[in-house]
């Protein structure tokens, strides 16, 4: 949710939408099938250190079909497999998961652990790179994620 809130404040490239889903479930199938590129951001449990940012493509996501890594009822891998069955023959799209490894997944709240908070800039960079955002937007996102003032245009262009 925190990544989505930051992304909503940014001037994203055309044809980019930020949507919030309370959970990964069958309600996402229509959006998944309508998108050419679908980037889902979520907390993950893959066995890496808390705060680790992972960026998984479709093939990588389906590897986790037998391993719970997501804090929701249906796994993304199962959702993608169902969508693949429903898609027209030959349909191709990019599906990505940008995940931030959490230590505790069965407690709900609005506070982020220090490891997850520190990972936000990296997770945002992954998302923005996947949607083809320009470098100045990535610098702006870094500032937003860190709670710093927005960078000057000179800094944004590496001047």
Image (cartoon, grey):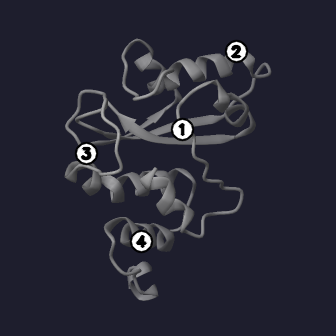
Residue 23 position, x and y percent, is: 52, 33
In the rendering, which numbered label is found on residue 22? 1
Indicate which disc, 3 or 4, sits on the residue closer to the N terminus.
3
Residue 158 position, x and y percent, is: 38, 79
SS class, disc 4: helix
Residue 91 position, x and y percent, is: 74, 27
Residue at image location 48% in from the left, 69% down from the top = 135
- The reply to whether discs 2 and 4 touch (Cβ–Cβ < 8 Å) is no
Residue neighbourhood size for the residue with mark 4, other residues' Cα within 10 Å, grouped as few (<14), some (14–19), many (≥20): many
Alpha carbon distance from label 2 to label 4: 39 Å
Residue at image location 43% in from the left, 79% down from the top = 156
SS class, disc 1: loop
- The reply to whether discs 3 and 4 touch (Cβ–Cβ < 8 Å) is no
Alpha carbon distance from label 2 to label 1: 24 Å
Q: In front: mark 2 or mark 1?
A: 1
- The reply to whether discs 1 and 4 touch (Cβ–Cβ < 8 Å) is no
Indicate which disc, 2 or 4, sits on the residue closer to the N terminus.
2
Where is mark 4, residue-wise? 139
In the rendering, which numbered label is found on residue 51? 3
Alpha carbon distance from label 1 to label 4: 29 Å
In the rendering, which numbered label is found on residue 85? 2
SS class, disc 2: helix
SS class, disc 3: loop
Q: In front: mark 3 or mark 4?
A: 3
Q: Residue furthest right?
A: 88
Determine whether 98 is above or below 74 in the image.
below
Residue neighbourhood size for the residue with mark 3, other residues' Cα within 10 Å, grouped as few (<14), some (14–19), many (≥20): many
């Amino acid at each position: 949710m925190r990544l989505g809130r930051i992304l909503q404040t940014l001037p994203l490239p055309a044809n980019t939408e930020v949507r919030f889903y309370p959970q990964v479930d069958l309600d996402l199938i229509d959006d998944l099938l309508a998108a050419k590129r679908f980037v889902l951001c979520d907390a993950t449990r893959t066995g890496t250190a808390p705060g680790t940012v992972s960026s998984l493509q479709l093939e990588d996501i389906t590897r986790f079909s037998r391993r719970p890594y997501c804090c929701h009822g249906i796994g993304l891998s199962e959702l993608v497999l169902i969508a693949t069955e429903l898609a027209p023959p030959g349909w191709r799209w990019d599906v990505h998961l940008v995940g931030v490894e959490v230590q505790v997944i069965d407690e709900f709240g609005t506070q982020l652990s220090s490891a997850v908070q520190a990972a936000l800039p990296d997770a945002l960079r992954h998302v923005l790179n996947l949607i083809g955002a320009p470098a100045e937007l990535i610098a702006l996102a870094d500032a937003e994620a860190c709670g710093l003032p927005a960078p000057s245009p000179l800094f944004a262009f590496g001047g």
